[in-house]
Amino acid sequence: MAKRVMGKLAFLTLRDDRGQIQLYVDRSRLDDSQPGGFDLLKGLIDVGDIVGASGTLKRTEKGELSVLATGVQVLTKALQPLPDKWHGLANVEKRYRQRYIDMIVTEETRSTFRSRSRIVSTIRRHLEAKDFLEVETPVLESVAGGADARPFVTYHNTLQKSFTLRIATELHLKRMVVGGFERVFELGRIFRNEGISARHNPEFTSVELYQAYADYEDMMRLCEELIRDCAMQACGSLQVEYQGTQLDFERPFRRVTMNDLVKECTGLDVLSFGPDLSAAKAAALAAVEKLEGSDTRHQARIKVSSAPSVGHVLNELFEATGEATLIQPTFVLEHPVEISPLAKPHRSKAGVTERFELFIAAREHANSFSELTDPVEQRRRFEEQYERHRSDMERGAANKKEEAASSSVDATSYSNGSSSAFGSGGGDSEQEDESPTKQKEEDLEDAPYEVAVDYDFITSLEYGMPPTGGLGIGVDRLVMLLTNSASIRDVIPFPLMK
């Protein structure tokens, strides 16, 4: 990684995965054992080459441990020069696209991926120590289930059938529980055909686990223990700094219901409206007007206005007002039934479920619930979700027809010489070109998509599933947190790029 030639002496810094050491080369000593070796080193070896060396250990006059070379050879010649050692890869996008270069020149990057490996190993060991069995479930599925997310679709030529890449491992793991495996987990890749951001990558890693004869209270305890274990292994401490904020994993994690948190932030008790959606929306929209930032208010207005139930109104207000306040580890409890199709209804509170999400540094890191085991209720919720998506699809198709008709009128106006179709003057043409593209991407992400009911999963429940607690943790976000990384791309070796 470094080379200095000073007359009859040369100094090379050699680095491998275990560390680095200086190679001390004396011309006469090297040439005695390897004639022409010094000239080879001087003329042919460059920074970035992979070399082999032999010799004896010694300390220089400055006390640096070195290898006194008696033999040097080029194992692999690097044809491409490395970036300047003082600046590394200044282009962030190039760091992601050519990660191998980033790994060569940036110790912080290598350290991040070592930490990632330790965290994954810790998760596996922690669960195995609690008698969980690691299993593998299909990546290709006939029906995408276990989450409300847009799937990637592919086609199998031999079977002449479309399949989706899994959006969760949940339903197959629950089938394992039905089959008699009482503690199972899977560390695996998940694929969701959705947006890319500092917190989202279409391909990501999660761990999902299921424990028979447990509930969401048991899962909270397990989750807290597991997060602490990972923090100790990755950081050596339960006091962890993330992006300038000190996080405390030592104290018991805070617990607060979603409705109470929204009440803290807005003064509004959403669940007190019962099934009165109109009244809940009116009160929520009034609360939205007090939010800071015009874009935040605009987005919240749209989501609250289109909420199909009081439970959805509560969730939208929580996302708009509550999430950003959750810096220290916090379990948010008792999500509405309407947004939790796989969760068991709360044993003593109507309208909410035995569910929690773990938030740290204003981001969701885990999702868990006492699993719904009633096949009749599960069928009802799945079919209700299906009908909602079908209605969204029909409404989206109708809107497209209206937009197409409107575009046709605009085009006619433009061809007749009217300036009103695109505004007057014709300036800012570059912005006009970019804006439709950006809007199109946003429209695609928000567009409704087709879902299907996994009736085979319902059939499996009809054979009897014991009371079960389930937990899912996003591994990439956890690695971000414990390596102080600002973007999810920093913790994925080869992230998806546009």
Image (spheres, rainbow, N blue to C red):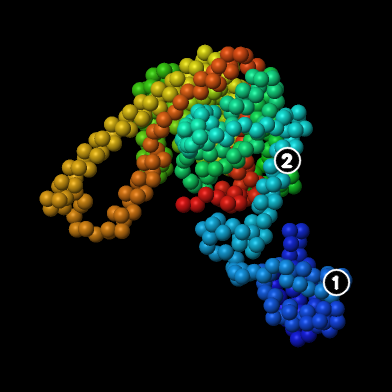
10 Å neighbourhood of mark 1: few (<14), some, or many (≥20)? some
Farthest left residue in view = 416
Residue 230 higher or lower than 79, as above or below = above
Amino acid marked by disc 1: Gly
The residue nearer to you, when weighing 256 against 491, is 491
Side of 438 relative to 15 (left or right): left
The residue nearer to you, when weighing 473 against 189, is 189
Q: Is residue 470 visible?
A: no
Q: Secondary structure at mark 2?
A: helix
10 Å neighbourhood of mark 2: few (<14), some, or many (≥20)? many
Q: In what quadrant of the picture does the N terminus appear?
A: bottom right
Side of 131 relative to 286 (left or right): right
The residue nearer to you, when weighing 204 against 310, is 204
Side of 194 relative to 190 (left or right): left
Q: Secondary structure at mark 1?
A: strand
Q: How many marks?
A: 2
| Mark 2 to mark 1 CA distance (whole Å) | 39 Å
Percent of width and height locating residue 85: 63, 69
Could you say which quadrant of the image residue 50 lies in?
Answer: bottom right
Tell which tag, 2 or 1, sits nearer the viewer.
1
Q: Which residue is mark 1?
A: 55
Q: Which residue is mark 2?
A: 122
Residue 122 higher or lower than 380, as above or below = below
Percent of width and height locating residue 149: 48, 34
Q: Residue at x 60, y 69 (%)?
A: 80
